[in-house]
Amino acid sequence: MKKTSIIFITLLSLVFNQNQNTYIWSGSSISIADNLDALNLNPAGLGFNRGEQQALIFKNLEGDNNFIGLTSRFKSGFAYELYYDNSSYNYSIGYGSQLMNNFYSGFKLNKKRDYSLGLLYRPFDFLSISSVIYDNHRNADYKLSRYSFAIKPFEINKLLSNKNSYLKKSNFSFGYDKTTNEIDQKIQEQYFLSLTITPGIDFSYFTYDDNYGFNLSFNLGKEGAQINTYSSNPFYGINSSSTSLVLYNYSQTLESNLNFKENKKLNYVFTNLDGYFIDEEPTVSPFDFIFEINIPFIGSENAVGIQLRKWIDNIHKITEDESIDGLVINLGNVKAGFGKRKEMFNALINLKKSGKKIIVYTQNDISGSDYYLISMADEIYTHSMNSVDIKGFNIEVAYLKQLLDTLSIVAEVVKTSDYKTGPENLTSKNMSKAFKENYGKLADDFYETYINDISLAKNWTYENTSKIINTGPYLTTKTAIEVDLISGTMYPDEFDKYINNLNDKKINIIKWEEYLNYEQYSYKWHKTKKPTIAIIYAVGGMMSGESNPGPTGSTIMGDVTIKKAIKEARENKDIDAIVLRIDSGGGSSLASDMIWREIYKTTTEDKKNKKPFIVSMSDAAASGGYYIACEADKIVANETSITGSIGVYWIRINFSQLLNRIGIYSENIRRGENADFGTSSRLLSDMEKEIAYESVMDVYNSFKEKVINGRETLDDINQLDEIALGRVWSGKEAKLNGLIDEIGGLHDAINISKESIGINSQSEVNIIEYPEVKEFNFFNFLNNEDKSDLTEINLKNLFPSEISDEINSLNIIPVIMDDDIQLLIPFNVVSD
């Protein structure tokens, strides 16, 4: 991990004896107090994010007085100290926060009602300015104001040769403090300097009047010790010198060259690769705890999805961390479409290319899609009774026409062309020629990507990979080992022993969760304001109303929810660019158009709030999904994203014949020639079908116009039929025919949005996600009449995954029922 050299500025002794000011420190500067010293020196420094910090202080004062104290601060800005000084127990609390960028304020209050108020301003990385007032409730002779500045003029390594590894990361700073007693107007001036001799060894010295103090600190990364010595300071009523020892622990990791023992070990991160991978942040039901126990025949828990973006961010973090040597993966059952898998594959293969090792173990059979994810691993182990089920792609569609005929149910469909195959399984008994042609090409593209990626990962030829796949599946581990698909077999305990014995047992296994909490301590004073990019997740079948987020992501994309998110992001002055992440096969034409309208305002109409708008396609952004994408400034899709399907169909499920069979008949009294148009009591007449067709073609032509107007690469509406009429495309083909601009994943789309606002793709940005995930609050639920903003409890999440997967397929029903005219593809394609 890229480390920043630091000056660990003086953890001074915390308090003095009972008759002394517990809120005044005699050392260092209030302008640099942003660690544990901030509580007593300048509580505004508590607003500067230093993670969590704790320290135990032992102090010896003249006259055989001793002191022991505990101090702690939190990421939130809250801090406290508890201490005992020979005769009594005391405590202090404090809080600091950021008022605006690089400007902080804070307060401290102790048991005796002494208090201090502080301000801290860091306009540049080389300058810090501050002021603090201290009020002594017990002693009216002490009411002090302190003003200060501190400067970091340069880094020593800029003046010395970079080849000098001992000094190249050292820093230097100095400062001046002026303290005034508001009662008698006495003044004290103080000067200090501080130096990081080398990461892990820090020294500071300060002087006031004829007195002085110094501090020497040693750190091993997160733990360290410091020795402090001070002479007396009568100005503060401190009439004795002191020596103290401070033992501290930080949640952020300090730069250190003293951690020799750790440097000799290999560091591996251990993770479970298992579960649902979703685009949006999972919304967790408040009743999840009910299923944390194992219920026979039902399941063990209510599954919660893993957000893809954050998972990839963490893989990138490991990739760039020089202190990490490899990744150990416990493979379970990954549930994700091919588009998401492609992004995960790319992240893992980049980790492998960085020189880090990947070792995989699984107790389960390895599916073809999961093998694709781990194919770049240096070593793959499983149980001897498992199989490697790698065999390619299979698109299987269940046709329901014969069942509907048996039930006397008719799916009435009017569509733009035969390529609009969304409702085909309801109107046909087998695959149409158009379906085989269109989805056959899609399968060809996916299969080629599948083989190419495994060939790259395994360093095989295309022909060898194709041969191994075509001779699969491998139902015994022996045959899988023979063709080099896996490395060997082990029991789980044998694998644990194997990992722990690597590098002659000199290995650290870091759990994924612990690694995610890792933060590097930064010496920078000034925090440059980062640009902000909004990511809006448009996930699920499209229909009017609200979305329905859940633990495994949304199944319904509500136009009201997405419109609101786009509008908020557009009108938020702090947001510089927008990325719309789409994972949808479409849905209601009305809902699609309402969302498109909000995007059009963002890219074209609302000149005052216009900002870059980039679309990132996940597993699918087809039909209605492409409808809302085409107005974007740039469209980015994976090779294996499903897109296109520019077409429309009208559908109605008619039960009139079934009702007649069971003795239910309807009669009408009409006033007007077409008063019973569209009645469900009979099938459509030819005239009604013609009217429906005109409506479908009207929507289709509007769809094409939006594509032509939105896409610079497409300018002939008549020629658009060559790639439209309902045809679906892989991201790879969509790039060739002009439907998208770039091949890539969500992070590529974020990088493009960075470049569109004039910053380098490597620059850091703040990410704001929409729709906002609302935490469930039981009391709000009872009192709030409007439940639209509360977490929805999706009943399918109360069932085990085997059942909920089947229930999930029924989510298309409300989408179809929401609107007769649909922009929808029939299904998602997965590898098995």
Image: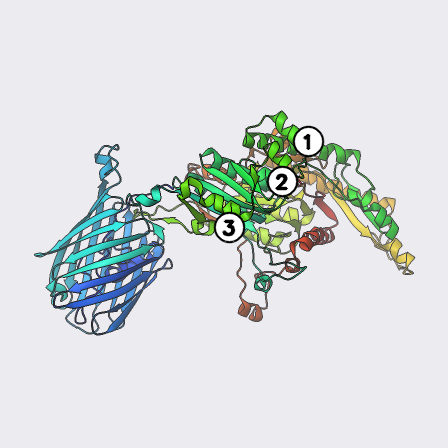
Name the residue carrying label 2: 369
Identify the image quadrant of residue 209.
bottom left
What amino acid does circle 2 point to?
Ser
Mark 2–mark 1 Cα distance, whole angstroms, equals 15 Å
Total numbered circles: 3
Q: Nearer the viewer, mark 3 or mark 1?
A: 1
CA separation in Å, label 2 and label 3: 29 Å
Instruction: Tell me whether circle 3 and circle 1 mark residues in contact (CB < 8 Å).
Output: no
Q: Can residue 608 be seen in this view?
A: no
Q: Is residue 781 left or right of residue 57?
A: right
Classify 12 as above or below 579. Answer: below
The one of 547 and 56 positioned closer to us in this rendering: 56
Q: Nearer the viewer, mark 2 or mark 1?
A: 1
Residue at 39% x, 39% y: name it. Answer: 322
Hey, which quadrant is residue 399 in on the image?
top right
Q: Which of marks 2 and 1 is nearer the N terminus?
A: 2
Residue hosting label 1: 470
Give the label on residue 769, or none. 3
Kindly identify the amino acid type of the residue bearing the numbered disc 1. Asn
Marked residue nearer the N-terminal end (2 or 3):
2
Q: Position of residue 832 (x, y in %)?
A: 67, 40
Residue type at numbered disc 3: Glu
* Percent x, y of residue 733: 63, 31
